[in-house]
Amino acid sequence: MSSWNSIPLQVLYTTFGWIAFFSWSISFYPQLILNFRRKSVVGLNFDFVVLNLTKHSSYLIYNASMFFSSAVQKQYREKYGLNEMIPVAANDVAFSIHAVLLTAFTLFQIFIYDRGNQKVSRTSVGIVCVSWLTVAICVFIALPSHSWLWLISCFNTLQVVMTIIKYIPQAIMNFQRKSTIGFSIGNILLDLLGGVTNYGQMAVQSIDQNSWVNFYGNIGKTLLSLVSIFFDILFILQHYVLYPAWRIGTSRDVDVIGKKPLLKASDHENKEDV
């Protein structure tokens, strides 16, 4: 069984892990609070939420299986080395459970709050259906040979694909509206912190073990961090540089400006008196 060679690095690894956990976990709340205050989800891309739910659900299956299943851990060590540490920590499992619940609640808000003319695209629905059908086929393939590590790798691959795809609709929507109103930047800032510390956690483990298996043995976690960081930076540029809120007066953001009354109440009353 593998163990830590350096206590300080172990402490740093744990610290990074829980910073990532709290950053990513808290990152769900600014959007939920924004939706609640506005009683509207206009500006939040529904495809982003639907794809995100598939992403976190598949990631939860991977993390829970890798962390709790002795059979999966045995196959992992047989493949990558008996002395290799399992690349999933308790904070990864805790985050995944929390993420599924909060994403599902965001989807609930979409059903009960003002949606404007927004809806989930057929493309997104199709992607989700094909994704779960594919992993269902993988389950039947893995059952006869008990290829559990390969099976959860399929779920890991699915979450990587969803991570790459899920940000695209929101980025395009922001570009088309020339605005990020309705999409919480607090979510993005916390997500960026989580991605950086998550990557740092993996680097610390690799340094301690003098092995980079941690990165390619859990390629999903590696790509998760890198892709998240890339899109977070893009959203930050959209929010603060390309489409800052102070430009709303000249923006063509029909979802926001379209809800403003054309006449003030006093003007309307004056016209009725004429």
Image (cartoon, rainbow, N blue to C red):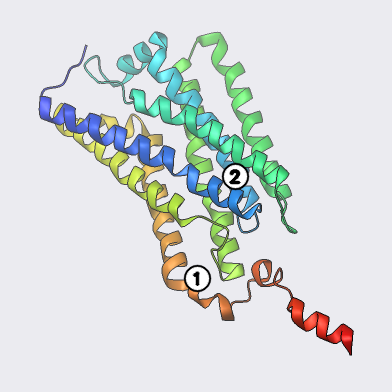
Place residue 214 in its image quadrant: top left
Q: Are marks 1 and 2 in contact (CB under 8 Å)?
A: no
76, 238: nearer the viewer: 238
Q: Residues within 10 Å of mark 2 (few under 14, many from 20)?
A: many
Residue bearing the label numbered 1: 245
* Mark 1 or 2, nearer chain start: 2
Whether residue 240 is situated above or below residue 123 in the rendered picture = below
Amino acid of disc 2: Val
Above or below: residue 108 compared with residue 146 = below
> Which quarter of the figure has residue 134?
top right
Tell me which residue sits at (39%, 53%) in the image.
189
Secondary element at image label 1: helix
Q: Is residue 199 left or right of residue 271?
A: left
Question: What is the x, y in percent for residue 7?
Answer: 11, 24
**Which residue carries the number 2 mark?**
49
Q: Quadrant of the N terminus?
A: top left
Q: Nearer the viewer, residue 45 or 144?
A: 45
Amino acid carrying label 1: it is Ala
Q: For the residue labelled by badge 2, is the local secondary structure a helix, a strand or a loop?
A: helix
Report, in whole angstroms, how far the alpha carbon at label 1 lies from the one at label 2.
23 Å
